[in-house]
Image: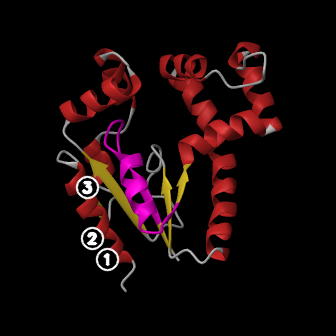
Amino acid sequence: MVIVGVTGGIGSGKSQLCEILETFGAHIYYADQAAITLMQSDIALKQQLVEAFGETLYDERGHLQRDVLAKIIFADPTARKKVESWVHPAVLKDTQQDVIRAKRQGKKMFVKEAALLLHHGRPEGFDHVVVIVADKESRIQRVVAHRGWSRQHVLDRMSAQMTQEEMVAYADTVIDNSGSLRQLHSEAEALIRTLIPS
């Protein structure tokens, strides 16, 4: 089974690419979604977060208030590093368990989609790293349309991330998603053919 990492900046189309790869039979692990799930279900992790940032991080039903966490970590780089240092090991362990499940299911490709995949350099355990890029304006428009954020909020998020150029330095494959969905589909198909020869 080939293990692939997919990353890119906000609005680049990471999830869109992964959805297409899934239609070709790839097993997809969405690290950002897994992190949220773990912050709600992992008792030790939840306790660390509450001790550091207070009870208001969770609502009365125990659900993570993502907007509260986002305000904390985007306003304070030290807080962001602290959260990442707690969440990253939990996600890594969860990923490893999911790789085992995918192998048991006979999957030929395991894809981990993660915004922070390359934030500490190229990670170990990946056969191939894909970086998806797009022009800045396309990315802004996608996020504004999809999430309803203001243009400034998107720009603030972009400035908190690695640049596309920094990510590309670690890539085995770079996919430009400035074009149409059909073009992205073709790129995904080419990637599958390269990594899983029939």
For mark 2, does the 10 Å Cα neighbourhood hold few (<14), some (14 to 19), or many (20 or more) residues? few
Q: CA distance from mark 2 to mark 1?
A: 6 Å
> What range is drawn magenta here?
4-27
The residue tagged 1 is: 194
Q: Secondary structure at mark 1?
A: helix
Q: Label 1 sits on what residue type?
A: Thr
Name the element at disc 2. helix
Where is 54 relative to 169, above or below? above
- Compared with 140, 28 (above or below) is below
Give the distance between the C-alpha atoms of the residues marked 3 and 1, in whole angstroms: 15 Å
Q: As displayed, is residue 162 above or below residue 111? A: above
Place of residue 39 in the rendered image (x, y in percent of width and height, measured from the top left) = 70, 35
Q: Are marks 2 and 1 in contact (CB under 8 Å)?
A: yes
Q: Does label 3 or label 1 sit earlier along the sequence?
A: 3
Label placed on residue 184: 3
Which residue is drawn at the image coordinates 39% and 28% (left, top)?
160
